[in-house]
Structures are given as structure tokens and as C-alpha cells.
Image (cartoon, rainbow, N blue to C red):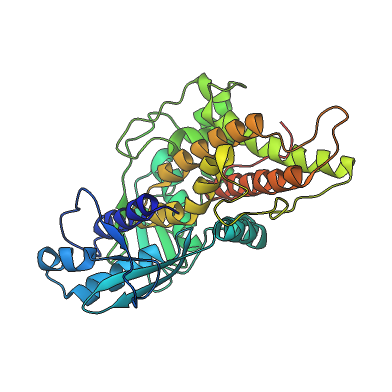
Amino acid sequence: MTPADLSRTVLHAVHRAVAENALRAPVPARVRVERTRPGGSGDYACAVALQLAGDAGLPALEVARILRERVAAEPGIGRVEITGPGFLSFTLDAPGDSDRAVLDAVRERGSAYGHGGALRDEVLQFHHAREVRAAVTADAVRRLVIAQGARVRISCEEAGEAEWGLLGVRVDAHGTPPVPLTPIRPVPAGATAGELLERLGADATRWGLLRPASHDRAPLGDELLVQGEANPLFRVRYAHARARALTRGAAALGFTAAPDGVPRTPDASPYDGPARPLLDLLADHPRVLLAAARHRAPDRVARQLEAVAHAFFDFHDSCPPLPSGDEKPSAAHRSRLALAEAAGTVLAGGLSLLGIRAPAHL
């Protein structure tokens, strides 16, 4: 991680803190980081907490704690300390260590990678109208907040369509409950669940209803069924299926994935180059899921999956995980396969949170 990378990471943490209402202050145009002076702590230091404290109306030490929470888990950051009146001091990972940590986390957590306990203290009550997009959106929001540890109950103003069950929708109560509740009010679909299921099927219906932001109209045309790159749902599912096919192909050739298959150097990671955009997206996946849960915005997950699929194919085409012709499997192939498998796992987990199947074959 370069000083410029670290500066962007800290600035991103400020944006997140402001977006999540943890910090109320104007976001600076840039954040300056400097090499730690002799006798100081860590590799780099930053005074952004002192800079923001006045506008935030908080002590600099409290601002530093808010930012440390959002920086500490970022790839490339080994340790974050608060020193003096509120300086942030950063110790960086060796190149490649954070990349290996991301791939290990995906492998260990599987489809639950990115789930967490940030909302474990929240008990949520969502309420929606008797309308299919509202029902599907509420169901997706339920999945997202439960994945972050919340307890949730959903009510609908009256009994819904029988076909809602075929879309995976479950309603806990009907009528308006006498407790504080959060309304789910996307722009209506303009069609019934039965009509959409008959024309599109369950998976394409859910994607079509969830992919646009709630305040936008949901396009629900036959383009959702196109088996080609122009259809984002097909591209996401095809990327997942291709990742699974790579694992099968590697097994047939007698090798398996190895995240550290390529020797690292002091100044580089084996995943630099064409692999970097994909690995960065995988590292960012937990943050995206938490933001989607906090903002009740399943469309954020859909856009994340599209970005992962796009980066996967770019990586796959530039750095094939399988040998071709008479080429023998190498350490590079094992390393690339580990990244491809992690991408497939993230795609499957994200689709599951949207209530959409991820077939191993298309």
C-alpha cells in the first residue's frame, strides 16, 4: 500500500462515518498522511481526527476512535493506533499478507463471507403494502439485516398473493402493528406476482424487482431472460458457474487452489496486476453488505455482484486459471484458481442474500 493508497483509504473511512451518521462534519477533499518521524509509532501518521473534531463537535480522540473502527479491517492495514491528542498511526501489512487474508476469509466463511454482528443489538419491524415489489424488497432487507445479526419482523397491511410464497416471501403478521415500524415503500412494480412469475420465473422476477434502487421504476421486460452478456443477471450467474467449472477442470488436471502459490517479494503481491480489481472488490464485500443492510438497499448488493462478475471475466481472460494445451499446472495457476474460487463464492453468497439461485451449470 502506497501513501496515496493509504490516504484514499482514510478518506473512504471518513466518507463511511459521515454516511452512517457516526460523524457529522464536512468531508475534506483529501487526507494527508506522512511517514512517522523517528521515535514515533507505526509506518505512517495522520492528523485528520484533529482536523475534523471542531466541525464534528467531538473530542479529537473520539473522532479518531470512530475512524479507527473503519480503517482497521481494510486490506493492507496491519494495525491502527491512536497516539497523542488524536493522531492515527498506521502499521502496514507486508505486500500480499492482506490479499492472502481476504482469500482465507472467503474460504473459511464460504457463502457467509461478509456476514457479521454489527446489527446484533437491533430489533427491527418492517411494514409494507400489499404489493409484490414491496414484499420482495422487504424479504431481501430481512435477509440482509439478519446476516448482520439483527432480529427482524415483517408485517403487511393485509394478506398477500398466494404466489408470494413462490418468490420466497414470508410475512410474519398482517395489519398495522401497534409498535414503531419502518415502512418499505419502493416504486410499485405495476404487475402482480402471478403475472411476473408466469412471464419471468422466480429468479428473474426477484432480480428485476431488486436491482433498481427503491425510488426507481423496476424494468421488468423480457431482457431479464436473455442468455447473454447484455443481461446483468445472466452475467453474474455465468461468472459463478464459470468459477465452479474451473474447480472441476482443475480437479480433472490433478491440481487444486493455493492462495500463496506464487512466491511474494518484499515490494509486491502475487495478486498485483490484472487480479487487483477483482481482489479489491472481494475485500470490500463485507463493507458493501453492511451498508446495504444499514440503508435497507438490496440494490447495492446487486451492483456489487455485477462489478465482481465484470472484474472476474477481465481477470479470467488476462490470467487464465487453467493451463492450455500441453502446459503443465503451475504455482501461478493454483494462485489464480484460488482467486477465481473466491469470486464464485462471493457471487453465490450475494445472490443468496437476494433470494436468487446460483446454479453450478448454465
Relative horizontal placement of residue 133, taking residue 180 as reference (left or right): right
Image quadrant in which you'd find residue 70: bottom left
Residue 136 on image: x %, y %: 46, 44
Residue 328 on image: x %, y %: 86, 38
Residue 229 on image: x %, y %: 57, 23
> Residue 94: in sight, yes or no?
yes
Relative horizontal placement of residue 305, taking residue 105 as reference (left or right): left
What residue lies at 38% left-to-right and 63% top-to-bottom? 71
Q: Which of 53 and 57 is in front in this view?
A: 53
Q: In which quarter of the image is the N terminus?
A: bottom left
What residue lies at 26% left-to-right and 72% top-to-bottom? 87
What residue lies at 43% left-to-right and 51% top-to-bottom? 288
Q: Which of 204 and 359 is in front in this view?
A: 359
Q: Nearer the viewer, residue 355 or 185?
A: 355
Residue 321 on image: x %, y %: 73, 38
Q: Nearer the viewer, residue 220 or 28?
A: 28
Image quadrant in which you'd find residue 228: top right
Q: Quadrant of the C terminus?
A: top right
> Residue 167: in sight, yes or no?
no
What residue lies at 25% left-to-right and 65% top-to-bottom? 22
